[in-house]
Image: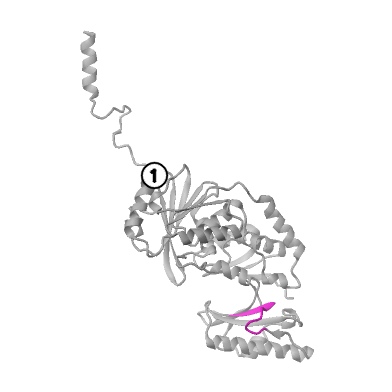
Amino acid sequence: MIDNGTYLARTHPGLEPVLETELKTAGASYLFSSEGQIRFQAEDVELYSFLLRSRVLTGFELLLSQPVDIGKADIEALTALVNWTEVIPLHSVFRVQAFHDGSTSSNLRILASELEKSICRHFEHTFESAPKAAREEEEPEFVVNIQVGSNGSCILTLDAGGPVLEKRASLHNSKSSIVSPAMAAGLISLSGWNGRDHFFDPFANNGAFLIEAARFAKKRTPLFEDDALLMKKWRMFRHALWKKKREEIVDEMRKDVNWIHGSDMNYENISRIQYLSRLLRLNSNIKLRVAKPNTLTFPKKGVVMTAPPPTTDLKLLGDFGRIVRKHATGYKLNVFSALANLDTVLGMKPSFSKKLVFSEREYTFSQFEIFAEKDKDTRGSKVRTSPGKKPGRKAVIKKDKRK
C-alpha cells in the first residue's frame, strides 16, 4: 500500500473552522483549507486520534496524485499518475467513481469506467491478472475517486471513509428533516455549549440536534459507535493501535447525562427519535415529549438550539420568541433557519450570525443572548418603594407623631 500520509478531510461548507480545530487537536500538520475540505498530513497515531474524535467529518480520502488539468490529460495519462500495484491488491474488488464539485453525471461515469479498464490493463501488463472491477450491486473493498474541481483540475484519491461517513453528511429519512448529523454537531460546536448545561430543542424534527448533543455530553463520538471505515480493509491499517485509541475514549465517557430535552408537535417525529435513540443506546439520556414550542419551561442555565421547519407558522414562531425572552433569562438561543427576517419574527437581535450553504440552500445560524429585563421601578435610587406609596408623605406623618 501507498503510505505518503497525505489525506483529504471533508465536511459541510462553513464548518471548516470546526474541522480544522479537530485536526490541530489531534496533532495533524501542514493543513491547507478550502471550501468544504482540508488537506493535511498525519502519522497513524494522530490520524486515528482525529478520526475517533471528529464530529463533523463527512468524507475522508488518501491522496494518490497531485492536481492535473483534466482537459489536457487522457485516460492513460491519468493511469500513469499512480503506481496501482502499491494501492490496490491483486486479489481484491475495486471501483472507480468520478465527481465534479461533489456531483456526478453520465460523462463522469464514462470517465470512471474508462479509468477502471485502464487500471486493469496496467495490472495485466505486469501480472497477467487484474483485480476485479465491482459490479453495481457488489460492495467494493477499494474505491478510487476522480475529483474534478470547478477550475478544471483533477486529483485521484482513495476513499478511506465510505458509507459510514456518507451517512453523517445526509439527512435522516424524515419529511421535516433540516440538518444532517454532521451539520448538527458542527452547529453545537459553534454555539459554545459546554455539554453540562440543559439543552433544549423545541422543533425536534429528525432528532439530529438531540442525538448529537447527547453524544457530545457523553463524549461518545460517531466513529466510536460505527467504525466500519473502508480504510480498515487496507493491509497497512494498524488494528491494535486503533483499538488502543478507541479504549481511550471509553475511559473518558460519561454515563450520568439526563439534561437533553426535545419536543415536537408531530407525534411521528417523537416516535422516530425514540426508536433511533434506542438503537444508539441514548434513550436514557434524551427526554422527549409531544408539545408546542411555546409551552417550554426553562430550568436555570442552559441553551436552546433548534431548526424550525420552513412551514412553521410565523405566529407560533413569534410566540416562541416571546416565551424565550420572558422565561429563559441567561440562556443562549441558537437557531438554524433559511428565514430572512428571523430576528424580526423572534423580536430579538442576534449577538452572532453565520451564513451557511446546506443542501443547496442558504441558511443563517444565529445566536441570541437572553437578558433579564431592567427593573422599571428602579431609577438610580437605592431605595425601592411599594407601588402607590409616597416616601415623602410617610416621613411627614412620622414627624407629626413625635410632636
Which residue was labeled with disc 1?
A: 327
Residue 311 falls left or right of residue 376: right
Rendered view: 172 above or below 389: below
Can residue 207 be spotted in the picture?
Answer: no
Element on which disc 1 rests: helix
The reply, left or right, for residue 226 in relation to residue 289 is: right
Residue depicted at x 49% and y 58% = 270
Q: Give x and y (percent) for residue 329.
A: 41, 43
Q: Nearer the viewer, residue 300 or 66?
A: 300
> Residue 272, percent across and down?
52, 61
Instruction: Specify the quadrant of the image occupied by residue 77.
Output: bottom right
The image quadrant of residue 397 is: top left
Q: Position of residue 94 (x, y in %)?
A: 68, 81
Q: Is residue 33 above or below residue 320?
A: below
Name the residue rendered at 44%, 47% in the picture.
Answer: 331
- Residue 146 shows in the view: yes
Horizontal side of residue 225 vs 190, given as left or right: right
Q: Quadrant of the N terminus?
A: bottom right
Query: What secondary structure do most residues of the magenta stretch adopt?
Result: loop
Q: How many numbered tags mark residues here? A: 1
- Read off the magenta span: 134-146
Asked if the magenta segment contains residue 274, the reply would be no
> Which residue does the image show at 21% across and 17% down from the upper left?
396
Color style of the picture: one colour
Front-most of 282 and 350?
Answer: 282
